[in-house]
C-alpha cells in the first residue's frame, strides 16, 4: 500500500514538526519508534506518512534539522566542535565531520571560519529557524505585503512605547530642543550619501559571504559614489526582488562580516536597510534645504510611487 500526502498525512507531519520543535534539545536521543508512539502510529505507518509529505524519511529529516542547528551553533557560540557534534546526536567528531561535509560541502572547522548558507536544501522547505525553532513554509511564509504591514505594526508599537516612556519626563524635558550629538561621529552630506550606497554594498557582500571594504567610505568622491551605486543598487534590488518573488522573506542567511557571525532573515535585513536609510535620507534632505537645494523636498516615497 502506498501512502500519499493526503490531508491526514499533512496534519501528522505538522504535529511531528511541532513535537520536534518542542523536543529539539533531546531529539537526537529519541528513537524512531518513540516518535511514532508519541503520535500514536506504528513505526511503519509513521515513516511512510512523514516521508510522503516531507520527501525524506523522518530520521533523515531530524538529522538534517539538527545539522542546521549545529551550523547555527558554530557561528553563534564558541562551543568546541565535539560538544556541538554530541548535541546533534553524533558519537564522534569523525562521524559528525562526515555528515556535515556531505550536507554542506566543507568540513565543520572550515565552515565555521567562513560560514555560508545555513539551510540545507530539502524537499519540504522546513528548516531550523534560529534561535530555537523550525519553520513550516505553509504556515509561516511572509509575503512582501505582509512585510510592509509588519513595518507599520512596528511603527505603531514603537510610537506607543515612546509615548509611554515619555510620561517619566517633566514638561521642561519634553519641550527641550533636541541637539544631535556629533562629537564622536560627525555626519556630513558626503558621509551620509557614502553610507547610503555603502549600506547596500555591505549587505550585498554579506549575502555573497565576502568582505566589505569600509575604507572606500573615507571621504569618498561623488564620482566614486555614482560608480558604486551603479553596481550595488541594481544588485541589492535584484536580491530583494528575487527573495520577494520566491516568498523567501523568512529564510535566513549568515552574515559572516559580523564578529562573531550572525544569522538574519531576509525580511529583517530589508526592514533594517529601509529603516536606517530613511533616517539618513531625512538628514540629507534637511542639509540640502539649508543650502537652498529644494528639488527633492523630503524625498517622500508616497509622492514617488504616485508618479511612477
Image: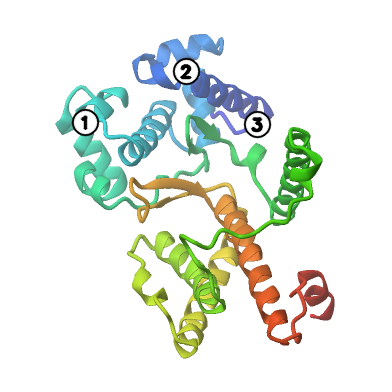
Circle 2 SS class: loop
> What's the residue at 36%, 47% (across, down)?
261
Query: Is residue 297 visible to us here?
Result: yes
Q: Looking at the image, is mark 1 or mark 2 earlier in the sequence?
A: 2
Residue 6 is labelled as 3
Closer to the eye: label 3 or 1: 1
The correct choice, above or below, for 190 with respect to 97 in the image is below
Indicate the quadrant where residue 91 lies.
top left
Are discs 1 and 2 less than 8 Å apart at CB? no
Give the Cα separation between the discs numbered 3 and 1: 43 Å
| In-front residue for pair 200/280 | 280
Circle 3 SS class: loop
Residue 80 is labelled as 1
Instruction: Quickly name the residue at label 2.
Output: 23
Are discs 3 and 1 less than 8 Å apart at CB? no
Does residue 161 appear to the left or right of 128 in the view shown? right
Does residue 46 appear to the left or right of 113 in the view shown? right
> What's the residue at 52%, 19% (across, down)?
22
Q: Residues within 10 Å of mark 1 (few under 14, many from 20)?
A: few
Query: Is residue 248 visible to us here?
Result: no
Amino acid at each position: 500500500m502506498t501512502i500519499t500526502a493526503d490531508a491526514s498525512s499533512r496534519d501528522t507531519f505538522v504535529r511531528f514538526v511541532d513535537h520536534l520543535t518542542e523536543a529539539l534539545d533531546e531529539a537526537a536521543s529519541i528513537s524512531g519508534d518513540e516518535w511514532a508512539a508519541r503520535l500514536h502510529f506504528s513505526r511503519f505507518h509513521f515513516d511512510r506518512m512523514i516521508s510522503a509529505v516531507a520527501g525524506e524519511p523522518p530520521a533523515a529529516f531530524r538529522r538534517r534539522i539538527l545539522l542546521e542547528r549545529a551550523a547555527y551553533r558554530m557561528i553563534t557560540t564558541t562551543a568546541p566542535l565535539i560538544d556541538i557534534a554530541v548535541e546533534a546526536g553524533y558519537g564522534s567528531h569523525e562521524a559528525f565531520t562526515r555528515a556535515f561535509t556531505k550536507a554542506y560541502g566543507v568540513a565543520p572547522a572550515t565552515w565555521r571560519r567562513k560560514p555560508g548558507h545555513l539551510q540545507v536544501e530539502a524537499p519540504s522547505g522546513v528548516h531550523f529557524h534560529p534561535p530555537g525553532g523550525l519553520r513550516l513554509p505553509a504556515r509561516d511564509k511572509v509575503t512582501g505585503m505582509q512585510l510592509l504591514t509588519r513595518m507599520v505594526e512596528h511603527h505603531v508599537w514603537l510610537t506607543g512605547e515612546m509615548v509611554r516612556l515619555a510620561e517619566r519626563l517633566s514638561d521642561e524635558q519634553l519641550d527641550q530642543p533636541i541637539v544631535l550629538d556629533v562629537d564622536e561621529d560627525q555626519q556630513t552630506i558626503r558621509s551620509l550619501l557614502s553610507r547610503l550606497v555603502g549600506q547596500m554594498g555591505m549587505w550585498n557582500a554579506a549575502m555573497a559571504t565576502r568582505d566589505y571594504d569600509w575604507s572606500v567610505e573615507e571621504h569618498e568622491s561623488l564620482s566614486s559614489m555614482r560608480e558604486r551605486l551603479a553596481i550595488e543598487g541594481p544588485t541589492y534590488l535584484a536580491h530583494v526582488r528575487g527573495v520577494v518573488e520566491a516568498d523567501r522573506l523568512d529564510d535566513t542567511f549568515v552574515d559572516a562580516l559580523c564578529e562573531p557571525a550572525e544569522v538574519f532573515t531576509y525580511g529583517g535585513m530589508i526592514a533594517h536597510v529601509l529603516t536606517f536609510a530613511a533616517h539618513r535620507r531625512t538628514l540629507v534632505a534637511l542639509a540640502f534645504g539649508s543650502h537652498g537645494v529644494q528639488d527633492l523636498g523630503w524625498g517622500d516615497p508616497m509622492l514617488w510611487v504616485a508618479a511612477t
